[in-house]
Amino acid sequence: MKKISITVSGLSGSGKTYVASFIAKKLKQKHYSAGKLFREFAKNSGKSLENFCKTREKEIDLMIEKTTEKILKKGNVVIDGRLTGFVATELIKKRKINCFRIYVDCPIEIRAKRVAKRDNIKYEEALKKIKERDKSDLKKYKKIYRIDPSSKKFYDVIIDNSKNIKSLNSKLEKMVYVFKAFMKGSI
């Protein structure tokens, strides 16, 4: 069996964690979430996720990047996070991993509805939080890495997640079929 790492990236509320979890479960692989690490750091700092993201030192990002690299090098893992596709691109260039990079795309209005439901807050509050976090994170990534991780150039496939869950699951089932064929050496 060939080893493959799969990254799933996207902005807040795009559905990247759902996509990564779905794929990991179907492939019986371990699922990691960079976002979960950020939430743990924020909780331990006593700050809200939004305030933590605005004020965190670049060492946090670099530490999560190094953790992501270690996880990706293991192979047969699925990891979601804003920078996972970028980190994987650097490892692919060095021929250190087999990796498939997915970007989950979704309009901000739909992302805000999802975040509002997930966090049990009003739509307007979710929209404001998403805009602030996206702006803060993208500014930080441009400063640290000189990149925009939402740029589609880092990804092998872009998934439109603006429709219903049935449509998304259908797309994901097809992708899982291809991943299984790759792992068996059929492609």
Image: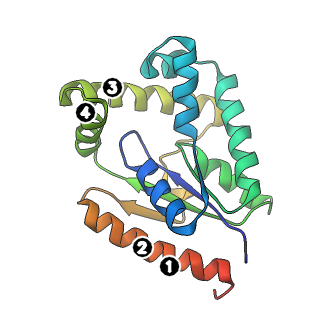
Q: Are marks 1 and 2 in contact (CB under 8 Å)?
A: yes
Looking at the rendered structure, the kind of residue marked 2 is Glu
Give the spatial CA distance, label 3 vs label 4: 10 Å
Vertical side of 79 occupied by 159: above or below? below
Give the spatial CA distance, label 1 vs label 4: 33 Å
Looking at the rendered structure, the kind of residue marked 1 is Tyr
Specify which label sits upstream in the sequence, 2 or 3. 3
For label 1, the residue is 177
Q: Dot 2: what SS?
A: helix
Q: Nearer the viewer, residue 150 or 21?
A: 21
Looking at the rendered structure, the kind of residue marked 4 is Ala
The percent position of residue 172, horizontal first and vertical second, equals 41, 68
Specify which label sits upstream in the sequence, 1 or 3. 3
Q: Are marks 1 and 4 in contact (CB under 8 Å)?
A: no
Marking on residue 116: 4
Specify which label sits upstream in the sequence, 3 or 4. 4
For label 2, the residue is 173
Marking on residue 129: 3
Q: Dot 3: what SS?
A: helix
The percent position of residue 27, horizontal first and vertical second, equals 56, 68
Q: Are marks 3 and 4 in contact (CB under 8 Å)?
A: no
The percent position of residue 120, horizontal first and vertical second, equals 25, 29
Q: Nearer the viewer, residue 134 or 52?
A: 52
Specify which label sits upstream in the sequence, 1 or 4. 4
Q: Nearer the viewer, residue 31 or 100?
A: 31
Using residue 46 as the reference point, say whether residue 113 is left or right of it: left
